């Protein structure tokens, strides 16, 4: 080895001496050129760093992403959503990254191709497939009148649609903004990708943000709109649902819903297929994959790429602020309508069949957090009053309702 290195050094020395002897390279000139190239290299490197392109708007978005991650980790606010979304926001707002083509909106970047699952509406139906495989519709089958609460909550979608029109958005943009009121992120992404793709990032972030903030937004409305006496109503246990009913429900429900809103077939079809895989009893392996491995993978990709698409230059705008304001209004109206309709239903029900109005807030579709919140608020009034299983009925009805509402909007505005 030493002999080889000696020979190599000798050859290099001979080469350098030969070149100098021919006058091709002057040592002083060579040193000056090397120094200049070194300075240019350092300058080019510094220009590629984020520090050279620092913008306060990027810092704002990075802080927002950091807050999302902290809320998910330390407060437990929908961690499966907020962790990938929050980190995606941080990744998507590194200053100057667009200069080297790594942003989700830049054709040719890796994130661009992953983001196509959002823009082309591929991820939302896959998420619905997973939701269907995880959902038990027994409580809705046993007490179908509670579907009214899921439908009532969709009023938030159409009232916000009107508000968005009033603020100057086009009908297509207003429809996309209104769907935030369904508190269903995949549905909001699916509709926006078709009607108003330029607002996809803003609407997706707003929808998922309000889904995660259910524990903050809903309790004050529940205590404001429902008297303590009605919050203490105890509901009768639901009847036992047979396996045949569970198997027939996704098939019959899909036929009815798709006839009403055929534009929602990609969402409704995958939702009820996932549920049929779960309830059939003969496709356990497919059901497990849809509910776990596949659903988790899609949620990671969807959340991360949606977050990464929120560049400050296009996200921090007056329109985005309006969208977040309208989204908050949509969510509050949807929650309030579910609660008030539950109280209205009680006027027509016998004393033994009255429902606890707290479960009306679960109609917003944020599964299963909204149902769990109805349980929590009920226990605060009466520690022995469990509402979770009752609340799951309007909760899953809200999922179906938001998909139908999306289909109706698409049929009018596409």
Image (tube, rainbow, N blue to C red):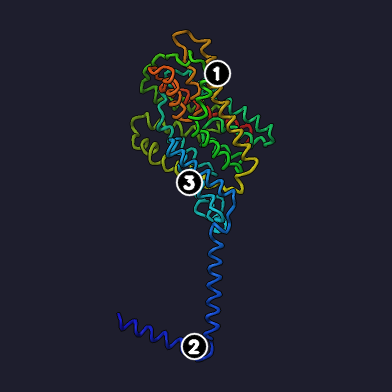
Q: Do the residues labelled 2 and 1 touch (CB within 8 Å)?
A: no
Q: Are marks 1 and 3 in contact (CB under 8 Å)?
A: no
Is 37 situated above or below 394? below
Of mark 1 and mark 3, the one earlier in the sequence is: 3
User: What percent of the width, then of the height, locates residue 41?
Assistant: 53, 69
| Residue position for label 2 | 19
Q: How far apart are marks 2 and 3 (CA)?
A: 55 Å
The disc label shown at residue 360, or none: none
Is 184 situated above or below 24? above
Query: What residue is drawn where x is 47% and y is 27%?
Result: 370
Label 2 neighbour load within 10 Å: few <14, some 14-19, many 20+: few
Asked if one can make out residue 322 in the rendered structure from this viewpoint, the answer is yes
The disc label shown at residue 87, or none: 3
| Residue position for label 1 | 340
Q: How far apart are marks 1 and 3 (CA)?
A: 38 Å
Is 24 situated above or below 240? below
Asked if one can make out residue 306 in the rendered structure from this viewpoint, the answer is no
Q: Are marks 2 and 3 in contact (CB under 8 Å)?
A: no
* Secondary structure found at label 2: helix
* Secondary structure found at label 3: helix
Q: Distance between the residues labelled 2 and 1?
A: 91 Å
Within the image, what quadrant is residue 7 found in? bottom left
Q: In this view, does 325 lie to the left or right of 1?
A: right
Of mark 2 and mark 1, the one earlier in the sequence is: 2
* Secondary structure found at label 1: helix
């Amino acid at each position: 080895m030493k002999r080889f290195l000696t020979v190599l050094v000798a050859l290099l020395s001979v080469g350098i001496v030969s070149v100098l002897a021919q006058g091709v390279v002057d040592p002083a000139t060579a040193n000056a050129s090397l120094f200049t190239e070194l300075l240019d290299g350092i300058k080019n490197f510094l220009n590629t760093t984020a520090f050279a392109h620092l913008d306060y708007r990027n810092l704002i978005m990075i802080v927002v992403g950091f807050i999302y991650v902290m809320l998910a980790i330390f407060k437990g606010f929908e961690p499966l959503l907020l962790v990938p979304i929050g980190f995606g926001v941080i990744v998507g707002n590194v200053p100057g990254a667009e200069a080297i083509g790594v942003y989700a909106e830049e054709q040719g970047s890796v994130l661009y191709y992953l983001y196509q699952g959002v823009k082309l509406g591929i991820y939302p139906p896959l998420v619905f497939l997973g939701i269907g495989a995880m959902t038990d519709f027994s409580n809705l089958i046993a007490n179908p009148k509670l579907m009214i609460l899921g439908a009532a909550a969709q009023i938030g979608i159409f009232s916000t649609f009107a508000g968005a029109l009033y603020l100057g958005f086009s009908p297509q943009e207003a429809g996309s903004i209104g769907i935030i009121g369904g508190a269903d992120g995949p549905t909001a992404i699916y509709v926006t990708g078709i009607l108003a793709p330029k607002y996809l990032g803003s609407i997706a972030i707003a929808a998922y943000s309000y889904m995660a903030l259910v524990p903050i937004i809903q309790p004050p409305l529940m205590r404001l709109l429902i008297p303590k006496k009605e919050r203490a109503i105890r509901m009768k246990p639901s009847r036992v649902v047979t396996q045949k009913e569970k198997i027939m429900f996704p098939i019959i429900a899909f036929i009815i819903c798709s006839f009403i809103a055929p534009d929602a077939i990609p969402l409704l079809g995958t939702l009820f297929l996932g549920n049929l895989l779960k309830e059939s009893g003969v496709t356990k392996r497919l059901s497990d994959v849809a509910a776990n491995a596949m659903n988790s993978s899609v949620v990671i990709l969807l959340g991360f790429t949606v977050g990464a698409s929120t560049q400050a230059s296009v996200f921090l705008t007056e329109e985005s602020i309006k969208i977040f304001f309208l989204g908050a209004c949509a969510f509050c109206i949807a929650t309030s309508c579910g609660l008030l309709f539950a109280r209205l239903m009680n006027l027509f029900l016998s004393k033994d069949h009255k429902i606890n109005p707290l479960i009306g807030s679960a109609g917003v579709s944020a599964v299963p957090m909204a149902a769990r919140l109805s349980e929590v608020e009920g226990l605060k009034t009466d520690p022995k009053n469990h509402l979770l299983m009752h609340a799951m009925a309007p909760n899953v009805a809200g999922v179906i309702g938001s998909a139908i509402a999306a289909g109706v909007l698409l049929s009018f505005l596409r």
